[in-house]
Amino acid sequence: MASRHLSRSIVMQSLYEWDFLGKKADDLKGITEKNIKEFGPGLEDVTFIWQLIAGVIKYLPKINKIIEKAAPEWPIDQITIIDRNVLRIGLYELLYGNKEEVPPKVAINEAIELAKNFGGESSGKFINGVLGTVFKQIQGEEK
């Protein structure tokens, strides 16, 4: 598994656990450190993990509002914890991440792969639909 993909998996698992346990700010660092040790023992550079965690948390209120707009029939609390956090990672990379390091289509594809690996049967399609909608809006604004 490529190191960035593994890093995203660790971030998703950490955000999942943090979200499940009630989103206590102090817990996320410890959860992430534990998951790096457990799931990424061969990772040489964990900088990308911490960039994603910090970015998602920094923009969390904005990202949640974007999810609510892009999927109005799915209140944020009714989206499964896996899908919700995969969307948060994908939207952070799509909207606020370094586009030279992670082009938008790579961010979308990576999020879809996370959803397929960790989510339910329809998670990949749901993630693709939401991120695709946001991506089309971005492209429309740039024109």
Image: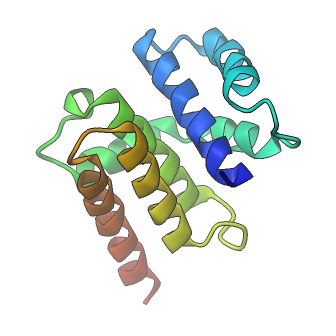
Q: Looking at the image, which residue is at 57% across and 25% down? A: 14
Which color scheme is applied?
rainbow
**In this orientation, which residue lies closer to the viewer: 68 or 114?**
114
Residue 99 in the image: x percent, y percent?
65, 70
Query: As rendered, which of 16 and 133 lies closer to the eye?
Result: 16
> In the displayed structure, would residue 65 be above or below residue 53?
below
Please give left or right for residue 114 compared with residue 40 in the image: left
Q: Quadrant of residue 120?
A: top left
Q: Is residue 52 above or below residue 10?
A: below
Residue lying at the far bottom in this picture: please name it. 143
Position of 134 compared to 15: left or right? left
Left or right of 119: which side holds 91?
Answer: right
For residue 80, above or below residue 104: above
**Residue drawn 40% across the image and 56% down it:** 112
Q: Which of 6 and 14 is in front in this view?
A: 6
Image x and y of residue 107, in percent: 53, 62
Count up the numbered dots.
0
Compared across the picture, whether 71 is left or right of 142 comes to left
Q: Which residue lies furthest to the right in this view?
A: 44
* Residue 65 x, y percent position in the rendering: 34, 43
